[in-house]
Amino acid sequence: MIKWDCKPSDEALKALEHINNMRSNLLDNLVNPPIVVNECPKQEKDMDMQYTIENTNINSTDREAKQRLRNRVREIYCSHQDKLDKKFHILDDPRPCSIKEIAERIEKGLFTFSWDPDEQPERPTAETKFDSWYDMMDSLTWRNPEDKKDEKGREKAGNDLDIAFQKTLDEVICLTPEEGLKSLNKFATLH
């Protein structure tokens, strides 16, 4: 049970009521999960690659090798995406974990505002005042202001990566595991 030092706002009470309803619904679904019965889709001649790999007459060792290669291609793809996000400064630095770290970053200027300070009044008014310390912290973005986000560059590089990913995945699926491994190794050295 929550004890309040002062009366919470109507919005806070509504939010708490919504959270309690969600919690109740979640618990109901855990105790009495809904039963869903789906019809099995009819198999057509044009089956996707996943089905083809797992159900053709290739031996189980090759099938397992291809599955492993497909999983590795996806892992490498995610790793490349992370590298692109860093390269083009898409992601912010991790948030500070202590008051000392907050002070150090502010002193060094390693932050930006998530809103344009020129458009905000200098002193909070009744409409713009921060409700809590967390609201103020959410107005800061933890990054070096010299590292500008390059969303267009990231998008172009991401599109090129998507093309290489799909090509590699197709080769892993269609070629022998040995040839697929060569394609995977080539893909791994892209970025």
Image (tube, rainbow, N blue to C red):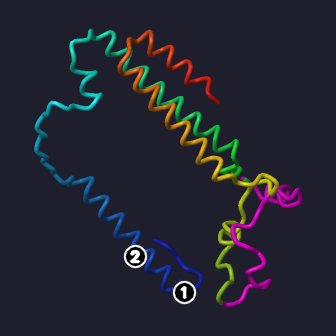
**Could you say which is closer to the camera, residue 156 or residue 146?**
156
The residue that label 2 is drawn on is: 17
**SS type, badge 2:** helix
* Image quadrant where one finds the C terminus: top right
Label 1 Cα neighbours within 10 Å, binned few <14 / some 14-19 / many ≥20: few
**Label disc, if present, on residue 116 of the rendered structure:** none
Using the rendered view, name the quadrant where residue 76 is placed.
top right
- Going by the numbered disc 2, the residue's amino acid type is Glu
**Count of numbered badges drawn on the protein:** 2
Mark in the foreground, 1 or 2: 2
Judge whether 3 appears above or below 48 on screen. below
The residue that label 1 is drawn on is: 7
Look at 48% across and 24% down and name the residue there: 72
Give the image location of residue 56, x and y in percent: 22, 17
Judge whether 179 appears above or below 96 on screen. above
Q: Residue furthest right?
A: 107
- Magenta region: 97-126
* Gap between marks 1 and 2 measured at Cα: 15 Å
32 displayed left or right of 64: left
Give the image location of residue 41, x and y in percent: 13, 40
Q: Residue furthest bottom?
A: 126
The numbered mark, 1 or 2, whose residue comes first in the sequence reads: 1
Give the image location of residue 84, x and y in percent: 64, 40
**SS type, badge 1:** loop
Look at 18% across and 54% down and name the residue there: 34
Residue 17 is inside the magenta segment: no
56 displayed left or right of 96: left
- Going by the numbered disc 1, the residue's amino acid type is Lys
